[in-house]
Amino acid sequence: MMIYPVLPLILGAIAAAFFRGTMRTVLMLLFVVLGAWYLFQLEPGQDLAYSFLGYALLPVKVDALSLIFAKLFHLAAFIALVYSIHVKDTVQQVAGLAYAASAVGAVLAGDLLTLFVYWELLALTSVFLIWARKTDRSFQSGIRYLIIQVSSGVLLLAGLLMLLKTRGSLLFTEIGLGHSGLEGVAAWCIFIAFGIKCAFPFFHNWLTDAYPEATPTGTIFLTAFTTKVAVYALARGYPGTELLVFIGAAMACFPIFYAVIENDLRRVLAYSMINQIGFMVVGVGIGTAVAINGAVAHAFNDVIFKGLLMMSMGAVLHMTGRINGSDLGGLYKSMPVTTVLCIVGAASISAFPLFSGFVSKSMIMTAAIENGYDWVWLLLLFASAGVFHHAGIKIPYFAFFAHDSGIRTREPPLNMLVAMTIAATLCILIGSFPNVLYQMLPYETGYWPFDVTHVLTQLQLLFFSALAFVWLNLKGLYPPELRSTNIDVEWFYRKLAPAFVHRAVSGISLIYQRVYLQLVDKLTAGVKSLYSPDRPTGYFARLWPTETMVFWVAVLLSCYLLLYYL
């Protein structure tokens, strides 16, 4: 008998709600390990199916694509739980595991209805990790996050209902955009729903708005799940959709400029996350076996090295209470271990050879050049250099080196260091022995990243990027860390739209008041002109002859008879 794979994580969330202290920690970790162990026992094709209202549903679809994401989410949940052991907030513990369970449920969903349920649960469970920081900014940010995430779910629901009408099936198979009529509308609705969660350009600000406002531990959960579920959904529903190549290239490039000028280092990493997702979206758009493998492998690595960088910045925030680059610097003196672990994460995201980013990013770039997307390859090369600047150099440099801020603290709690060490070890292990990861990928391609041309190209790119950073910094041309508000797309709905609505409402109110007052004045004057008993000129104040009154009575009676017979 098959056990529902999400069940261990749900039981872990329940345990987090009812137990305290060491027992709670042990139970939460135990259920995550049990869930991961069970996934390793499953084989592709061991699906769970049943019928609902005459429609075939597939709550669990086990194949190579869903399995690797489900295993990844268990690994991420384990690391995040270790990182958050010192946290005594029950809400965060419950929300974190429920969020992980929703992510696993979503990637194992073989039908769109099950996917929709977990799609919305992702939003409802994760928002508590933002609100848990208990600041006005986090509350407002959480509200905006929830509205956008639920809107994505509404689009998904509309799309699946239209797809049900045209196809007569709810099974989550390849959808594509090459349809017409109602099926085409459905495909676009679902595509946009996935795109919102994936942080497509113009839909991306929920990520840079919400993630930096969450608690240090909450951000680790947030970094791992929502966007990766969206990448999985695109890989399942829209592989080989060329539009994704263009969207992914834009995602890989535009966040670089914001990340370079951003002062909040966790927001820098949020922009960096969009940049990395751009690589994955390009891979899904190309759609070949190597490209899809590259997208999945990079999603796997991104969860680990981006989580490591977020954990190191979370440790800085936890120990100093500050996260702006302008307020930090010189922390390597009091946090040397955290500094080294952060540098490992920076080397991984920058795709240094023998670090994890190198073995996955190279697959996507190889697929781009092999399939004739030369200019996309150039854009990805530019994006790689940008990543090295803002995440590989800027994050460790401004947090731990640069000018000495005078802050003296100590290393974070042991559990935070252990979690970061696990992630750093995985970064080096996967980067040095990529077959550990490759054997879990959906396709067998025989790809090997360590050829001379590729290694030399990457080393040259990193060397000249570092040289450019040093030169710009020495010449004072590198954007300084300043306390500032950077304008992004969110300006449209946080500033322009409210200002427009305010002006529109004020205008309508003004017009209403003027029209209303003028109308009241006119009516009052009219009534007074009709009935002014104190004046001899008033209409009803006049003396009327009897014949006139008889005439009007006759008119009224005629009207009455007419209405009666009608």
Image (spheres, rainbow, N blue to C red):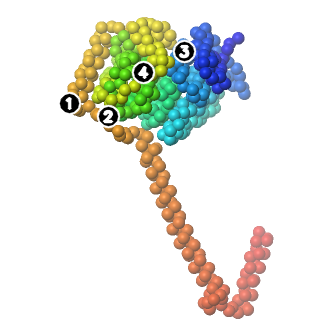
Residues at marks 2 and 4, CA–CA distance in whole angstroms: 24 Å
Question: What secondary structure is found at the residue carrying circle 3?
Answer: helix
Question: What secondary structure is found at the residue carrying circle 1?
Answer: loop
Question: Tags 2 and 4 in contact by the CB under 8 Å rule?
Answer: no
* Observer-nearest of 546 and 22: 22
Left or right? Give the position of 447 relative to 519: left
Image location of residue 528, percent across then percent down: 61, 82
Nearest to the eye among marks 2 and 3: give it: 2
Disc 1 designates what residue?
Answer: 475
For the N terminus, the image quarter is: top right
Left or right? Give the position of 508 relative to 526: left
Q: Which residue is drawn at 51% across and 34% down?
A: 133
Disc 3 designates what residue?
Answer: 71
Q: Examine the rendered structure and indicate whether residue 257 appears above or below residue 353.
A: below
Kindly indicate the quadrant of the structure image that contains residue 521. Answer: bottom right
Numbered badge on residue 481: 2
Q: Counting residues from the N terminus, which is met first, the one under dot 2 or under dot 1? A: 1
- Identified by mark 1, the residue type is Lys
- Identified by mark 4, the residue type is Glu
